[in-house]
Amino acid sequence: MKPKPKIKAKRTASAAPSLGPVQKKILLVDDHPMLRAGLAALINKQFDLAVCGEADDAAKALQSIPGSRPDLVVTDLTMPGRGGLEFIKDLQVMHPGLPVLVVSMHDEMLYAERALRAGARGYVMKEAGGEKLLVAIRQVLNGQVYVSEKMTAQLFEAMTTRRPRGSSSPIEALTDREFQVFQLIGSGKNTRGIATQLCLSSKTVDVHRANIKAKLGITDATALVSHAVRWVETQGSSDKEAGPIKG
């Protein structure tokens, strides 16, 4: 008797498991719940992106990273407690290689360079809109740096030319910590309040105040408060003009 021929099973396309695109995970850090919700809705609509967690301050964000394992942190700069610039520096130490994209209402001409120096890989103003935000996210995830064309031109000019003396704002001469203290003075915080928020001693805050006065050419505390308040109000008026990011 002849052996029966073996029948080979035909492979069909449905037999192979269907694998979807690998989604990059994003951690959102912002103290405004409505803004986080808007960002999450925009990001979660994308086939290649997904929000893996949210936090309303730097401390909670740092606690959530080991569990959420994000591929990218999208953060604001102004948050309660530890500020955004210090948060970015902490990330570089605690999670080296984890890219950070700043999304902020603050004018990029004043803040973007500081954010990049702190370790961020990109800076987007909230008024830029959803499309540019998604471009920035994908560009940073791809290992590149993202800033606006206007900011790119300024950074290039700063690297290739010497600015005439006195052409830049005295605010730019402040260190990141002095810049934080200056902002808080303008927001109405006294020395004790600033020390509490930044986890510093009152004596250290006083040293920062003295350095700020020297760099800005201000002679007394009242003039410093007045100058800081005017500066913060100017920033606030420009912030109100910026609408929420839309998809």
Image (cartoon, helix red, strand yellow):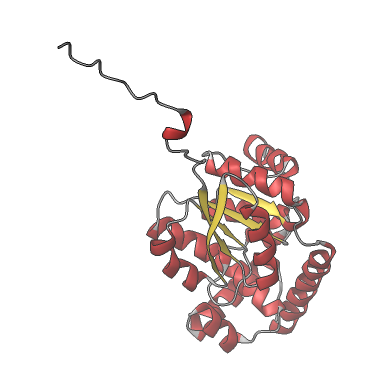
> Can residue 213 be seen in this snapshot?
no
Q: Is residue 102 left or right of residue 108?
A: left
Q: Does 201 appear above or below 232?
A: below
Observer-nearest residue: 25 or 29?
25
| Spot occupied by residue 4 in the image (x, y as percentages of width and height) | 22, 16
Judged from this view, the residue extending furthest toward the top is 2
Q: Is residue 218 left or right of residue 29?
A: right
Observer-nearest residue: 29 or 111?
29
Residue 208: which quarter of the image?
bottom right
Residue plotted at (83% across, 69% down): 237
> Can residue 180 be seen in this snapshot?
yes
Q: How many marks?
A: 0
| Spot occupied by residue 160 in the image (x, y as percentages of width and height) | 64, 34
Residue plotted at (48% across, 80% down): 200
Residue plotted at (73% across, 40% down): 149
Pick the quarter of the image with the N terminus.
top left
| Spot occupied by residue 81 in the image (x, y as percentages of width and height) | 55, 77
Q: Is residue 79 left or right of residue 96?
A: right
Observer-nearest residue: 176 or 204?
176
Observer-nearest residue: 52 or 215?
52
Q: Does 1 appear above or below 91?
A: above
| Spot occupied by residue 214 in the image (x, y as percentages of width and height) | 64, 70
Residue 92: which quarter of the image?
bottom left
Judged from this view, the residue extending furthest toward the front is 1
